[in-house]
Amino acid sequence: MTAMYQHYSLRPTESKMKWSVIDRWPTNEKLVKTFAQNIKSVLETFEENKRKDVILLFSAHSVPQYVMDRGDPYPAEVGATVSLVMKELNMCNPYRLVWQSKVGPLPWLKPGTEETIESLVKRGHKNLMLIPIAFVNEHIETLHELDIEYANDVGKKVGAERIARCPTPNDHPLFIEGMADLVYNHLQNGPRVSPQLLLRCPMCTNPNCGKTKNWLSKMTKT
């Protein structure tokens, strides 16, 4: 969003476009149902006598801790999706929300996916399922990081019996319907921008963030 603001702020004339922004949808009903259906399908591939003990690890992309200290709502929004998915599943299995893809030496949001796998398996939980809860399609962080680095390499290192991985929504028909509904309802009922997007984090120190939100507020006024 900041890149958009910077681009249009350099133009000699103001944009005449009518801006409308869908910036968050963690509680979308069909997104939730898509994840729940995918999880059910993967659970069915476990041996019946072990199925109810499979631990569901909802893995989302981590962020530096300093971002969280500013008051970013990201963890709460991811957690909302997880809670609704588990409600849809009738709390069928034990679960946790964990965080992947940390880079660099700074502290990041924890617990990490890799460390969680190691800890759980050492405690005797040998069957796990990784669920890429904050991703909507397959890419390097699912196909390589989750499938190869964690499910295969870490799993073998710590002696897991099986670490499965739930697919992302991809082109699941229910997910596509959910996106279409989201766009249609947004265009019909608005708002053109959510008040949540216009609010800066309480401890935000980035001046461009404030400028971006002021610009966005102006561009989305009716």
Image (cartoon, helix red, strand yellow):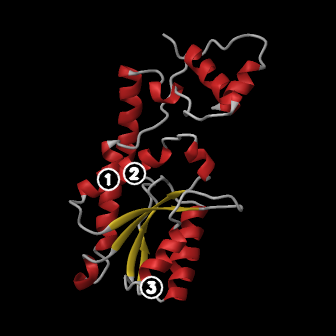
Mark 1 or 3, nearer chain start? 1
Question: Which is more toward the observer, 177 or 147?
Answer: 147
Residue visible at 33% across and 50% down in the picture: 32
Q: Would residue 194 be seen by someone viewing this image from the given angle?
A: no
The x, y position of residue 133, in whole percent, is 44, 56
Q: Amino acid at mark 2?
A: Gly
Question: Which is more toward the observer, 108 or 34?
Answer: 108
Dot 1: few (<14), some (14–19), or many (≥20) neighbours within 10 Å? Answer: some
Residue visible at 28% across and 66% down in the picture: 40
The x, y position of residue 212, in whole percent, is 64, 25
Residue carrying label 2: 79
Mark 3 or 2, nearer chain start? 2
- For the image shown, how many numbered marks are present on the structure? 3
Residue carrying label 1: 83
Q: Would residue 44 be seen by someone viewing this image from the given angle?
A: yes
How far apart are the two marked residues, 3 and 2, measured between alpha carbons? 26 Å
Residue carrying label 3: 122
* Quadrant hosting residue 62: bottom right
Left or right: where 144 falls relative to 86: right
Disc 2 secondary structure class: helix
The x, y position of residue 162, in whole percent, is 41, 83
Left or right: where 118 falls relative to 28: right
How far apart are the two marked residues, 1 and 2, measured between alpha carbons? 6 Å
Q: Amino acid at mark 3?
A: Lys
Residue visible at 48% across and 72% down in the picture: 116
Circles 1, 2 touching at the beta carbon (< 8 Å): yes
Residue visible at 53% across and 41% down in the picture: 72
